[in-house]
């Protein structure tokens, strides 16, 4: 049984309007109840569980991460659109939007991505980090490639193509290859939750690859489209 599905008893008590012992706090607590009884969701419980699993170690390394537990937490999350839609910005002028949900003690980035129909990411690596992806809505296609041979100009070799749907979890790191992620639906937006840890991609960028030549190019990722549900990017 995944802990994600269990609401903690403190959460119930904390947000219950019947626990007013301090009258001077009454208005404040009441507004908390009104705004948070929906939000004290399994989504915030998921974030707390991920944060606790990753921990606050300032020198977190790849091998310190309990990636099996992180995958089972993301798999166990009972997704409800109302819990995450405030992070879900759609912009049809882009292939996707990257929306920061939480940076988890500075040790990871939890990002919600919304995918324009039929659009994809570039082929990219993961800068020596773990990447766990949970599909929240729609149909995502992942194409995994072998790393190119240094100095040889030739098309990238496809290792495998996988189709994912709402509820599915995918995992990649640099040992497994490089990949491209795309929305496999011509008409509908797809939404996926991505956990990158340690947060090397945010700090250092990543490499993208040309499918026809194998040539790579280092990019710094541009700013998030939104952070904590607030749009932060300048739209063209």
Image: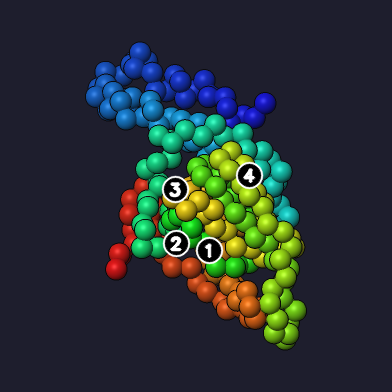
Residue at label 3?
188
Residue at label 2?
95
Image location of residue 184, percent across then percent down: 54, 53
Tell me whether the residue at label 1 lies in contact with that at label 4, contact meaning CB atoms closer than 8 angstroms.
no
Disc 2 element: loop
Residue plotted at (58% across, 72% down): 208
| Residue furthest to the front | 186
N-terminal label among 2 and 1: 2
Disc 4 element: strand
Disc 3 element: loop
* Mark in the foreground, 3 or 4: 3
Image location of residue 21, percent across then percent down: 34, 15
Image location of residue 1, percent across then percent down: 67, 26
Tell me whether the residue at label 2 lies in contact with that at label 1, contact meaning CB atoms closer than 8 angstroms.
yes
Residue at label 4?
169
Left or right: 203, with 36 as reference point = right
N-terminal label among 2 and 4: 2
Disc 1 element: loop
Quarter of the picture holding the C terminus: bottom left
Q: Residues within 10 Å of mark 2 (few under 14, many from 20)?
A: some
N-terminal label among 1 and 4: 1
């Amino acid at each position: 049984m995944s802990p994600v599905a269990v609401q903690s008893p403190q959460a119930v008590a904390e947000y219950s309007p019947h626990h007013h012992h301090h009258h001077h706090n009454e208005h404040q607590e009441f507004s908390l109840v009104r705004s948070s009884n929906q939000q004290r969701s399994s989504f915030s419980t998921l974030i707390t569980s991920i944060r606790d699993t990753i921990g606050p170690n300032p020198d977190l390394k790849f091998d310190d991460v309990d990636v099996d537990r992180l995958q089972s937490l993301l798999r166990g999350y009972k997704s409800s659109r109302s819990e995450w839609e405030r992070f879900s910005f759609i912009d049809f002028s882009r292939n996707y939007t990257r929306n920061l949900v939480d940076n988890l003690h500075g040790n990871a980035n939890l990002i919600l991505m919304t995918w324009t129909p039929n659009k994809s990411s570039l082929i990219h690596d993961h800068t020596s980090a773990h990447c766990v992806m949970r599909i929240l809505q729609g149909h995502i296609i992942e194409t995994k490639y072998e790393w190119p041979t240094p100095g040889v100009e030739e098309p990238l070799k496809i290792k495998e193509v996988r189709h994912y749907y709402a509820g599915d979890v995918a995992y990649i790191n640099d040992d497994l290859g490089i990949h491209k992620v795309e929305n496999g639906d011509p008409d509908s937006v797809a939404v996926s939750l991505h956990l990158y840890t340690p947060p090397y991609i945010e700090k250092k960028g990543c490499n993208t690859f040309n499918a026809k030549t194998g040539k790579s190019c280092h990019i710094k990722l541009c700013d998030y489209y939104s952070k904590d549900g607030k749009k932060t990017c300048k739209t063209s």
